[in-house]
Amino acid sequence: MHPYLPHLLADIEALIKEPPHGVYYEEPPHIEGMPEVVEIALTPFTTLEEITGISRKEILPFFELTNDEWPLLAKAFKNLLQALNVAIADLPENYPGDAYVNLIQSHWDAQIQYLHLSSYDLECCTRDNETRPYVEDCLVRGPNVNNIDNDLPEPISRGFFLDDGIQVDPMQVHIPGHCLCCKNYLTGDPEQNICCTLMRISAQKEEEFLCLFYLESESPLQ
């Protein structure tokens, strides 16, 4: 057996038995009883490397393991992600174990949220024919890649761009804490929600976030 594999498996098993604790956030009065919403809004993005304390350099590539060893590591990774409430949303069924180990290693430093109360969906498809990890089995970009756009709904993030033309995923935009104390946060008005998202995107690199739509709630969070 690879001399380091037992140590890596032991570290992963310890995390499975006792996952890191999630951060407790006080619920603002106007969304009281919705801890999952507060968690999603306030939890910063991090990486599996930071959550587990296991460096990416410590993840053994599958080609250094034997055919009896990499299935052990693949199973350990699957159990670990389950313990951390992280799901690979676009993972095809019966995905090979050696490729799975490689997939986890390549995404060990990917930006995710550690959502202790709910879960986080990690998407690994690059939506590019040359780099997509699943090849023909890809659920997003399969063999009919030229026609698939006609069958898929428009992505939610379409239309959100920075000044330099880079597209932005609104689900990965930081939400300032005082947004939770605003009457306009998560309202039933879709146009207002879009305006709030645009304000947060435009202020990503600003030291101080000043929102034109901020309306203090009757019982603001102190």
Image (cartoon, rainbow, N blue to C red):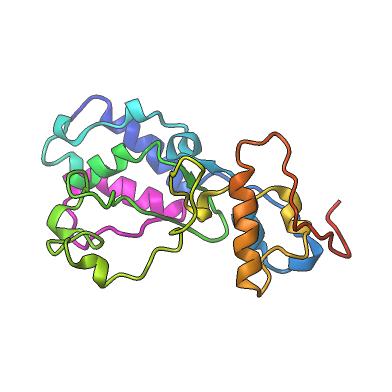
Please state the extent of the stretch shown in magenta in the rendering: 71-98
Question: Which residue, as the protein is rendered here, is positioned at the far right?
Answer: 218
Asked whether residue 43 is in view, the answer is no
Q: Is residue 86 found inside the magenta-colored segment of the image?
A: yes
Q: Residue at x 14, y 64 (%)?
A: 144
Q: Is residue 84 magenta?
A: yes
Residue 74 visible in the picture: yes
Tell me if 173 is positioned left or right of 164 in this view.
right
Q: Position of residue 170 (x, y in %)?
A: 52, 54
* 114 left or right, relative to 60: right
Residue drawn 16% across the image and 33% down it: 65
Q: Quadrant of residue 2?
A: top left
Residue 19 image offset from top left, x and y in percent:
51, 46
Between 67 and 45, the residue placed more toward the observer is 45
The N terminus appears in which quarter of the rendering?
Answer: top left
Point out residue 60 in the picture as x, y percentages from the top left corner.
26, 31
Instruction: Judge whether 47 appears above or below 160 on screen.
Output: above
- Counting from the top left corner in percent of width and height, residue 199 is at 64, 52
